[in-house]
Image: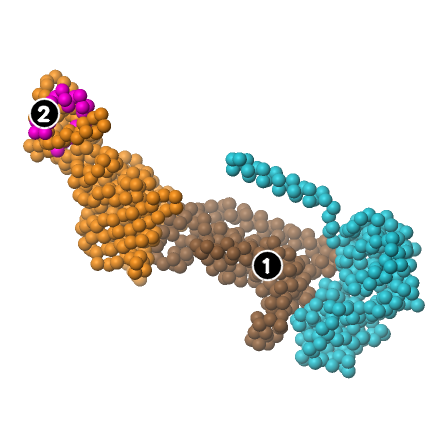
Amino acid sequence: MDWTAIWVSVRLSLATMAVLVVVGVPIAYWVAFSRWRWKFLVEAIVALPLVLPPTVLGFYVLMAIGPRSPAGRLYEAVAGSGLPFTFAGLLVASVLYSLPFAVQPFSAGFAAVDARLLEASWMLGISRLETFRRIVLPLSVRGLVTGMVLSFAHTLGEFGVVLMVGGNRPGVTRTVSVSIYDHVQALDYASAGQTSLLLLGVSFVILAVTYALQKTVWAAWPSHGR
Amino acid sequence: MAGSLALSIERRFTGGPGVVADFTVPLDAGSIVVLFGPSGSGKTTVLRAIAGLDRPDRGVIRFGSETWVDTSAGTFLAPQARCVGCVFQETALFPHLTVRGNVEYGVRDRDRAARTARADDVLALVELTGQAGSFPRELSGGQGQRTALARALAPHPRLLLLDEPFTGLDSPVRLRMRRLLRTLVREFGIAAILVTHDRNEAIALGDQMIVIAGGRVRQVGAVLDVLRRPADVDVAHSVGVDAVIPARIERRHGGLVDLRVGEVMLRAVDTDFDGGPRDIVACIRAEDVTLERAVVVNVSARNHLPGRVVGVEAEGPLDRVTLDCGFPLVALVTRQAREELGLREGGEVVAAVKATAIHLVPRA
Amino acid sequence: MKPRIQQLAAGVALTAAGLLAACAESTAPGEPAGPSATLSVAAASDLRYALDDVVTAFHTEHPDIEVAVSYGSSGSFYAQLLNGAPFDLFLSADVEYARRVADQGAGLRDSLFTYAEGRLAIWVASSSALDIDGRGLEALTDAAVTRVAIANPEHAPYGRAAEAALRAAGVYDTVRPKLVLGENVSQALQFVESGAAQVGLVALSLALAPAAAAGRHVLVARDMHPPIEQGGVIMTRASHAGDARSFRLFMLSDQGRSVLERHGFTVPR
């Protein structure tokens, strides 16, 4: 059982989830409330990782963070070492890979909040941003939780992107999915089977608990106005 | 309080004539302006434009000396900055906050205690002190609307806007809410603009009335003036009442009331307003007024009112006869009947109205 | 048509299209393509350039035999072949995989053969100033070299060879923290080619390939690592066993060998 790889995967998933909350909420806010006529283009871009083969995504990320790109060079100048093959580089790729799994539930949750509640808040003198904080966020907890859990679980199972961008460094970028793949390639089916079973069990438990909670705890907070 | 609201706006909708509204109306402290018209006539559009929730395509909205909207100058004051309270038909209470939390929401005092104190004051006014810790889903319809009113008023707005707030409520609750609204509006010293399609509500609450039909403003004026002298047939039809008579209840006996209108006494069936107001408005439809040559006895109609014919107007196969019986009254009769009675301007006639045909609306 | 019926019709049409597509002949990686009179070969992806040329030369000799090659990783092919993937011939970069396939009975033991010996090379981009010619593997210890790409030693023969060579040169401990592992030797090359790694240990056949034109290489001495035996086996359930044998013979013939040698392989005499 490759515990180091499991820990790398867990850390990566947690970090990706955290970054996606910070990055995803503003994007989801814009998607939910903007009336720009070309909004559908942005929605399509956000949804791209859903349909792109992960290897394609990984390939482009490697190009984008490598030493030949402005972003890569900037990072190297600031941080002292390159971005590819580091945990940080993998985090960048994971955030992009799981972006729609966070943004779509977030924005669906925001948009489900009754517009009349927003209007009531504005009439009471509260700005749009403050209304978002005091009304929309509390009433879209379900969407937020769904987005967070999905991005965590999705990153946990990430493979193709890690393969392209990670460099398979033990303890740094060797995630559990790559570790399993390596065992299979080396014809060590026993180890692969063990780790796979653990991953399957953990993922199932996380999802089951989340869906159970959504039924009970959050039912006390209806997301629609009376 | 600012003196008046001047509005001249245009809002287009795809596949429809849109709304073109133009009126100026005084906003005296404690007064209620009714925006009246049938469903879909554009009243809500106008109200939302006043609130700042919708932008008109073209036009100007001025509140006293403040310009809230001027499309030619590119001026648009956000709803947050207009300091206007709003009550919707569906309350739109925040489900995750208690009643007190809802009422406190718009109050901007820095001090937490001051905020709570203000909220509690308003809650007392609407008699919801006991409900302060409840959540909106636990409230009845009337309690919900009272919370909505309290929430809108707690920040001390300069104007109160209401969009059919009492429509979903039971009749006795509605009557209480109307009285409450009048109390609050006087207490806070502001004016309110109320949207309704309910004629009784307009009569009960309105001081000024704006009639909107088909996306256009048809008439503006004091409520009784508009109801008595509708500007055109459309207004008359939407307003639907031909005689609107302010009266006082002099005596109640055995399920009937005696009404005094100046020198004239009317008898009508008592409606139970739970012992309430003396000042009421009596409404009589022209269809319910019969005309006769002289007083006839032993007939079921209790009210026989001698009067003089002021005018006769043809309306299809019928004639609309306007009378003066000490107060204005309108009767709708067949042409044949008019001819048989020999009715013409200046002539004397007696109008008969059944006690059951006089509809009483308490003034709130 | 009413909207409801329109939607239903669209749904039925889409489903029918999907079913038809599924039933049609699919060319998934790992499955042989083309008409059934074709020799189907499963080959390790790092054989790509060399094998393409071998196939061309073979076809000139045997114009009646069509050859279709599917490239993939040896580990994946192993699993697929054991589960009956319909290939005729399996060519691996590591004879060990071919041997295991034969051990499991999926391959004909008597057809097991080593067709070439691979060579390891140090590869850098042309723009690199690293003196690999003069210093060899020792150059990898430079501070300027932060990342060294090799194939994954766990399952790639060139990875194992790279690891062994580094040990033999006495630089393994210094270089180890700098290692980044490609899933196969091609990916190791790609890491260097993209600039993310400064130097890589790759197959010589790859270093000579057009893909590596923007770089330069230096051979690693043969005695620095265990020999990289590249081998293959004919499948037991091959439907074109005869053609497979012809191909096998061709690879072991002088003609086949010269093609392989051109691609940087050493051929056993």
- Decide whether residue B331 is among the magenta residues: yes
Tell me which chain the residue with mark 2 is part of.
B
Outermost residue, top direction? B298
- On screen, residue B118 above or below C228: above
Q: Secondary structure beneath disc 1?
A: helix
Per the model, the C-alpha gap separating discs 1 and 2 is: 89 Å
Q: Position of residue B245 (x, y in %)?
A: 15, 34
Q: Residue at x 58, y 56 (%)?
A: A48
Quarter holding the N terminus of chain B is bottom left
Height in image: A204 above or below A169? above
Q: Which residue is mark 1?
A: A97
* Residue A221: percent from left, percent from top: 44, 48
Going 74% across and 50% down the picture, which residue do you hit?
C27
Q: Is residue B132 left or right of residue A137?
A: left
Mark 1 crowd level (few <14, some 14–19, many ≥20, 10 Å Cα): many
Colour brown maps to chain: A
Chain of the residue under the numbered disc 1 shown in the image: A
**The label number, if any, that marks residue B349 in the structure image:** 2
Q: Colour of chain C?
A: cyan
- Range drawn in magenta: B328-347
Residue type at mark 1 is Tyr
